[in-house]
Image: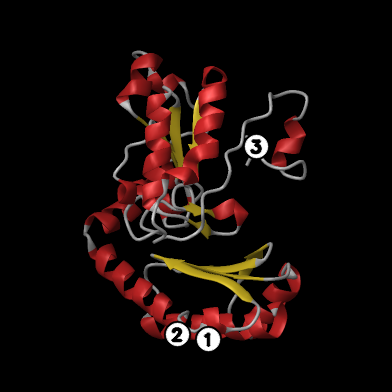
């Protein structure tokens, strides 16, 4: 968000200091939408024209969280990665929101069968228990940094509590139990949201892994929506015209049914 965005975003703080970033057209929405070469026509034109000015392409893989959980296909992600290889541009995957099984695989990039040059991680790295981030780098990047890559860090990197929470969370993920949990939760979400697309005023209804998002025709009053959801026993967040759920791995099937019921009630009462 600090790299680019509209004039009302965090990027506005850097205007006049940092050269504005190029922005690609958003990918067509739809996880299962068949990829077409024309989908990347404008992106390829931009990279072909400006690749000598571009150091890296930053991408939120499969799920664009900042824009309201907009989901797109693994094929589109893989094609973007190929474009970067063709023009010798670093491919940076921002998996802060999508990483650690949120999209149904350990990392969203896994579904596109790609390995980014850099990967940004946080949030679910510690199961949400501690503030902790990490940046993974390919040998292509590390070789440039030389013999002391850890010199490129921050003052509070590798905090003891953050690392302990991260290691404990990784130990749990390494058991492989998450695969059964994700399959159960994804099925419950898909089943629970099946009828949402038939509700008048709903324009898009999507789920992927532990994530679900419903978009409506009009901008949602986020404060009113959240306040009403609290009266129903849950807290649901909105971005623009979209309300969404991000389900923890340890959520029971009964709780998911309760969540989807409250979600529907909130949408019909406040957003539509």
Q: How many residues crowd around disc 3 within 10 Å: few (fewer than 14), some, or many (20 or more)?
A: some
Give the mark toward the camera: 1 or 3: 3
Mark linked to residue 4: 3
Residue at which label 1 appears: 261
Q: How many residues crowd around disc 2 within 10 Å: few (fewer than 14), some, or many (20 or more)?
A: some
Return the x and y of residue 244 as percentages of the image width and height: 56, 68
Q: CA distance from mark 1 to mark 3?
A: 36 Å
Q: Could you say which is closer to the camera, residue 257 or residue 171?
A: 257
Q: Could you say which is closer to the camera, residue 200 or residue 167?
A: 200
Return the x and y of residue 232 as percentages of the image width and height: 62, 85
* Quadrant of the rendering where the N terminus is positioned: top right
Q: Is residue 145 left or right of residue 96?
A: left
Return the x and y of residue 50 as percentages of the image width and height: 57, 22
Q: Is residue 121 visible?
A: no
Q: CA distance from mark 2 to mark 3?
A: 38 Å
Marks 2 & 3, CB-CB < 8 Å contact? no
Query: Can you tell which quarter of the image residue 121 is in?
Result: top left
Give the mark toward the camera: 2 or 3: 3
Q: Is residue 130 left or right of residue 82?
A: right
Q: Is residue 98 visible?
A: yes
* Quadrant of the rendering where the C terminus is positioned: bottom right
Mark linked to residue 257: 2
Q: How many marks?
A: 3
What SS does tag 1 mark? helix
Marks 1 & 2, CB-CB < 8 Å contact? yes
Return the x and y of residue 251 as percentages of the image width and height: 40, 75
What SS does tag 3 mark? loop
């Amino acid at each position: 968000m600090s790299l680019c965005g509209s004039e009302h975003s965090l990027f506005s703080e850097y205007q006049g200091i940092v050269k504005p970033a190029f922005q690609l057209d958003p990918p067509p929405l739809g996880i299962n939408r068949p990829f077409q070469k024309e989908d990347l026509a404008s992106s390829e034109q931009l990279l072909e024209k400006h690749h000598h000015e571009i150091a890296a392409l930053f991408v939120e893989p499969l799920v664009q969280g900042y824009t309201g959980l907009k989901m797109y296909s693994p094929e589109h992600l893989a094609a973007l990665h190929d474009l970067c290889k063709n023009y010798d541009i670093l491919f940076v995957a921002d998996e802060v929101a999508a990483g650690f099984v949120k999209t149904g695989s350990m990392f969203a990039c896994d579904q596109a069968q790609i390995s980014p040059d850099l990967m940004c991680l946080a949030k679910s790295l510690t199961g949400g228990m501690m503030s902790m981030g990490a940046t993974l780098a390919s040998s292509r990047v590390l070789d440039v940094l030389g013999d002391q890559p850890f010199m490129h860090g921050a003052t509070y990197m590798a905090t003891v509590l953050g690392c302990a929470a991260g290691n404990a969370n990784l130990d749990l993920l390494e058991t492989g139990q998450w695969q059964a949990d994700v399959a159960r939760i994804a099925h419950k979400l898909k089943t629970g949201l099946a009828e949402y697309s038939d509700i008048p005023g709903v324009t898009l209804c999507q789920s992927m892994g532990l994530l679900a998002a419903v978009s409506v025709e009009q901008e949602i009053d986020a404060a009113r929506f959240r306040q009403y959801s609290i009266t129903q026993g849950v807290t649901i967040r909105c971005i623009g015209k979209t309300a969404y759920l991000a389900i923890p791995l340890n959520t029971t099937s009964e709780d998911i049914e309760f969540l989807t019921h409250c979600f529907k009630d909130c949408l019909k009462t406040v957003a539509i």
